[in-house]
């Protein structure tokens, strides 16, 4: 029986080669794209789940009430970890975590690496398998460090790394460390990345901040005991908060902050490790997995459109098999047998398409990874569970999608089938509804593409308040004092007419080639009010180098000795002071030391553009190192100027890798999420339209063939070509119009909600929806137009003879 099903299924599929090929192409592409998008989506969702103790690991954060509302951060003071270990009984292990760059030397090699400063429990909490050296407690001694496999190769090649001594530059001095273990490179799904791990007590600022509760500069992770409730962590830290944050709480009460419902103003909380990659602190931790879910949603939509095509074409072609069904029933075939016959044909198409789609996805994986900037691999799928789920999905999709046409055909009566006539009203309504859903999805994705691209262009072209085209930034790596290195750079390039200004700061603008970005915050009391501000340590000529605009006062100048005890602020900070003349304000550095404001800058975007411009205070302080150099070059010969800066820096720091990039490139890197989402939805909308058009073309082909006689009769009695074309296309255009009415408000709601994440955004208007609708109409006309025009121009005698 099964052999017979297979034989008949093959004959029918081969007999209708055109429609079989259309179905296979559409489904294969849909399966291939769905597999790739699913890999990317599940890759994102798998972040940090590879740790064996992931379910019991949490990141500590704190929230506080201020007069302007709640704030939340995940950086802490150095003494907090020991206080947590003492006061919270359910905490099993703890570690501080600070990521900074470090210059590592071995022999003649001098390499700038990503270092993490952690406590001894770090490798007991997190899973980074050791491949050489100590398996347990590899950071038991403060003089020991752990390096990754790639770091070992960079430093020692193929030689044994364990037991060797390297030098790490800390506070301007080389300190020796012994390599106790080599661990595997961090997984691509790890939110913790590093080249080497060093004990936290050896970090340069630790001794100065060891007992300071006011300096918050590192993360804290905890591992809870079995069956511990993370919600109780807040209550367990109440005494700790009351003891060490009393002054902050009193200030909040004095300034009029509204407490939490339980009457408290400051509290600690725990964030699950698996949420760390998806959190954004905005008054409280907001965990959002919208991006990976959106990727998976687009995969399902594309697969759904291809399945709709299959259903529509199967139902539309059912009229050609009515007599076959009637003859089979006359010969004794049962409904169940007919169902399995038609369903087996669907299964062959789906299974073959899924196999082709899998091959296509394997061939396209490298290009896909480059296009979407993902490290996802097929390794996520090459395990028994995903393979079984994949096969189960094919069976279920085939059963549901292929089962509907099979059930429709198998239920037909014998007499009705032999007559070759079928009541089409019901199935036409189903066909029309599915076409409406198809084009609604397509219009939704087209609208999303238009809005996303417009917003991305708006952000790229926005005036950020500084010169991003002509300014080059680079990390100041090397063993020389940063101020000395910048002065040497000025001297080296002083005779180059294309070099206009040189300065430096302790932070970068945007993402440089070193992929590092940070922020420094400072809080102080001003006239019985607490004020928080971002802090930036700069060198002279910083304002001139970036073409920042002074609103009032003056910039730092070398001729003024007291400028090292003064500050320059932005307009947002001036509003925080609330003074009519901000030049009368001051920043309280200590209880006895106030830095007066000598200048006010026009606001500029120093953070990512999904944040409003925050208060900023600039200092001149040679005790604080500078981490990034800035060079303003002439608009002509910019490539030549870049080479000149690189050459000059290689003379100053011959062992340091020059990682310079222009600020417009840095800013563009901050749009990685937006660019990825825009690319994904753009390609999704193109594919959705293409698949919809494949189905629409096949349906129009069948309808034209079914109405050949009608077209001939109408032409004989005087219908014009335009009348025939309108007759054949109006129903399709009506369906597209209904799709537009359904999709437009949904798209508007989604895009309006998404744009709320940006303080700087485009104005959403009806033009986006209208453009998307016109694109859909134009594509639909193009799809069905060729076949309808050909039918309308055909000789009516031939049309009548054909029928």
Image (cartoon, helix red, strand yellow):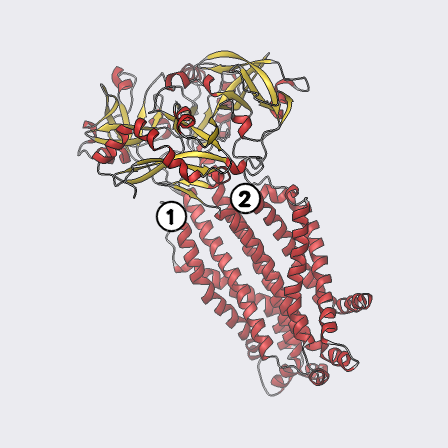
Tell me which label, 2 or 1, sits earlier in the chain.
2
Which of 538 and 545 lies nearest the eye of the viewer? 538
- Relative depth, front residue between 416 and 469: 416
Q: Tell me if 310 is positioned left or right of 686 in this view.
A: right
At label 1, counting other C-alpha atoms closer than 10 Å, the crowd grade (few under 14, some 14-19, many 20 or more) is some
Q: Residue at the location (61% across, 73% down)?
A: 789
Query: What residue do we see at 59% from left, 18% from top?
Result: 180
In the displayed structure, would residue 639 be above or below residue 393? above
Identify the residue under disc 1. 761
Q: Which mark is residue 45?
A: 2
Residue 572 pos. (x, y %)? 28, 36
The location of residue 369, given as percent across then percent down, is 60, 42
Out of 34 and 470, give the one closest to the viewer. Answer: 34
Q: Quadrant of residue 354?
A: bottom right
Provide residue 106's location: percent of width, then percent of height.
58, 14
| Residue 428 seen in this snapshot | yes
- Secondary element at image label 1: loop
Quadrant (top left, top right, bottom left, bottom right) of the C terminus: bottom right
SS under mark 2:
helix
Q: Nearer the viewer, mark 2 or mark 1?
A: 2
Image quadrant where one finds the N terminus: bottom right
Question: How far separated are the C-alphas under marks 2 and 1?
Answer: 28 Å
């Amino acid at each position: 029986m099964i052999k017979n099903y297979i034989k008949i299924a093959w004959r029918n599929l081969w007999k209708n080669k055109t429609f079989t090929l259309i179905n296979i192409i559409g489904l294969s592409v849909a399966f291939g794209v769905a597999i790739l998008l699913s890999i990317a989506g599940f890759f994102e969702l798998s972040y940090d789940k590879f740790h064996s103790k992931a379910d019991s690991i949490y990141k500590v954060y704190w929230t506080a009430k201020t007069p302007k509302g709640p704030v939340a951060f995940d950086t802490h003071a150095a003494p907090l970890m020991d206080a947590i270990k003492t006061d919270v009984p359910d905490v099993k292990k703890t570690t501080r975590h600070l990521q900074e760059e470090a210059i590592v030397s071995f022999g003649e090699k001098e390499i700038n690496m990503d270092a993490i400063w952690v406590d001894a429990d770090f490798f007991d909490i997190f899973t980074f398998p050791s491949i050489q050296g100590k398996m347990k407690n590899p950071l038991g001694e403060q003089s020991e460090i752990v390096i990754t496999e790639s770091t070992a190769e960079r430093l020692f090649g193929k030689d044994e790394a364990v037991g060797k001594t390297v030098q790490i530059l800390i506070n301007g001095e080389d300190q020796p460390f012994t390599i106790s273990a080599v661990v595997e490179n961090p997984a691509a799904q790890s939110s913790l990345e590093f080249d080497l791990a060093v004990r936290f007590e050896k970090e340069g600022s630790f001794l100065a901040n060891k007992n300071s509760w006011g300096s918050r500069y590192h993360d804290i992770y905890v591992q809870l005991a079995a069956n511990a409730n993370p919600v109780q962590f807040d209550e367990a830290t109440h005494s700790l908060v009351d003891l060490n944050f009393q002054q902050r709480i009193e200030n909040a009460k004095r300034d009029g902050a509204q407490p939490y419902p339980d009457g408290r103003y400051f509290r600690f909380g725990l964030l699950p490790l698996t949420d760390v990659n998806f959190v954004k602190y905005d008054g409280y931790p907001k965990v959002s997995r919208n991006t990976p879910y959106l990727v998976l949603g687009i995969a399902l939509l594309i697969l759904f459109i291809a399945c709709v095509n299959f259903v529509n074409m199967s139902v539309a072609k059912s009229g050609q098999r009515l007599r076959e069904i009637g003859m089979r029933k006359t010969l004794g075939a049962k409904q169940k047998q007919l169902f399995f016959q038609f369903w087996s044909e669907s299964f062959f198409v789906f299974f073959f398409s899924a196999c082709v789609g899998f091959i296509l996805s394997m061939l396209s994986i490298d290009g896909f990874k480059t296009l979407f900037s993902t490290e996802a691999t097929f390794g996520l799928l090459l395990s028994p569970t995903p393979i079984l789920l994949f096969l189960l999905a094919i069976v279920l999709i085939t059963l549901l999608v292929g089962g509907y046409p099979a059930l429709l055909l198998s239920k037909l009566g014998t007499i009705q089938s032999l007559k070759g006539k079928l009541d089409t009203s019901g199935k036409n309504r189903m066909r029309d509804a599915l076409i409406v859903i198809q084009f609604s999805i397509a219009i939704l994705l087209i609208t999303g593409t238009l809005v996303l691209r417009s917003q991305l262009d708006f952000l790229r072209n926005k005036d950020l308040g500084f010169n991003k085209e002509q300014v080059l930034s680079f990390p100041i790596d090397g063993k020389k004092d940063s101020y000395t290195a910048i002065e040497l750079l000025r001297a080296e390039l002083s005779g180059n007419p294309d070099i206009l200004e040189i300065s430096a700061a302790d932070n970068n603008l945007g993402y440089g080639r070193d992929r590092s970005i940070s922020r420094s915050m400072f809080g102080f009391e001003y006239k019985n009010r607490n004020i928080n501000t971002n802090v930036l340590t700069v060198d002279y000529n910083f304002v001139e180098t970036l073409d920042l605009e002074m609103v009032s006062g003056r910039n730092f100048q070398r001729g003024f000795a007291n400028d090292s005890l003064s500050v320059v602020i932005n307009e947002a900070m001036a509003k925080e002071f609330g003074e009519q003349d901000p030049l009368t304000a001051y920043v309280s550095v200590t209880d006895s030391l106030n830095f007066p404001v000598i200048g006010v800058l026009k606001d500029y975007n120093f953070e990512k553009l999904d944040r409003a411009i925050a208060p900023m205070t600039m200092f001149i302080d040679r005790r604080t190192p500078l981490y990034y150099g800035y060079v303003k070059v002439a608009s002509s010969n910019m490539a030549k100027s870049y080479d000149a800066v690189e050459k000059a820096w290689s003379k100053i720091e011959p062992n340091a890798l020059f990682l310079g990039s222009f600020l417009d490139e840095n800013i563009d890197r901050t749009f990685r999420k937006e660019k990825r989402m825009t690319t994904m939805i753009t390609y999704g909308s193109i594919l959705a339209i293409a698949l919809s058009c494949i189905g629409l073309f096949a349906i129009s082909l069948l309808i034209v063939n079914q109405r050949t006689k009608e077209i001939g009769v109408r032409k004989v009695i005087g219908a014009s070509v335009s009348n025939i074309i309108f007759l054949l296309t109006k129903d399709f255009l009506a369906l597209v119009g209904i799709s537009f009415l359904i999709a437009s408000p949904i798209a508007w709601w989604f895009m309006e909600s998404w744009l709320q994440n940006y303080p700087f955004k485009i104005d959403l208007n009806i033009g986006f929806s209208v453009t998307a609708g016109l694109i859909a109409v134009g594509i639909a006309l193009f799809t069905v137009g060729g076949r309808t025009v050909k039918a309308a121009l055909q000789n009516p005698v031939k049309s009548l003879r054909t029928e």
